[in-house]
Amino acid sequence: MDRSKMLKPTILSLSLLTIVSTGAVAPALGEIGKFFASSDHMLVQLVAVMHAVALVPSLLLAGRAAERFSAKRLFWTGWRFFLSAASRTISGFCYSPGF
């Protein structure tokens, strides 16, 4: 497929990813603020936007990595990292004394 035809759906999907992830974190900001009561209010609000700021450099690095390695190999490596992090997070929540 032509790269120019893929540019518009790619940009739209990345925009949607940023909006959805911010929308998922925003309702929890009140609880996060209570947990970090001694922290500055602006610092707590950075939780909602820092992942979007970190998204751009990571996408640039992923583009370079996809050029160097195969896209399929890069996808499966990322999938393994995601599953590993998700399983550790879930097991941490399950064994938390406050849960």
Image: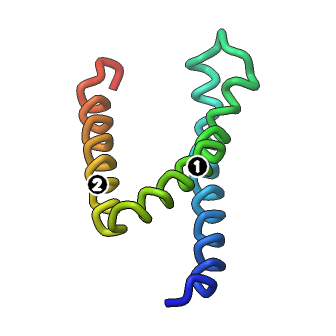
The residue identified by callout 2 is 77
Please provide percent x and percent y for residue 45: 70, 32
- Callout 2: helix, strand or loop? helix
Q: Residue at x 62, y 77 (%)?
A: 7
Does residue 25 sit above or below 72 in this rendering?
above
Q: Residue at x 62, y 34 (%)?
A: 47
Per the rendering, the mark at residue 55 is 1
Q: Residue furthest top?
A: 38
Q: Residues within 10 Å of mark 1 (few under 14, many from 20)?
A: some
Q: Residues within 10 Å of mark 2 (few under 14, many from 20)?
A: few
Q: Residue at x 73, y 16 (%)?
A: 40
Please provide percent x and percent y for residue 11: 64, 70
Q: Between residues 62 and 14, which one lies in front from this camera angle?
A: 62
Label 1 and label 2: CA atoms lie apart by 18 Å
Q: Quadrant of the C terminus?
A: top left
- Callout 1: helix, strand or loop? helix
Q: Residue at x 31, y 31 (%)?
A: 93
Q: Quadrant of residue 79?
A: bottom left
Q: Between residues 7 and 48, which one lies in front from this camera angle?
A: 7
Q: Quadrant of residue 16?
A: bottom right
* Three-letter residue code for mark 2: Thr
* Three-letter residue code for mark 1: Leu
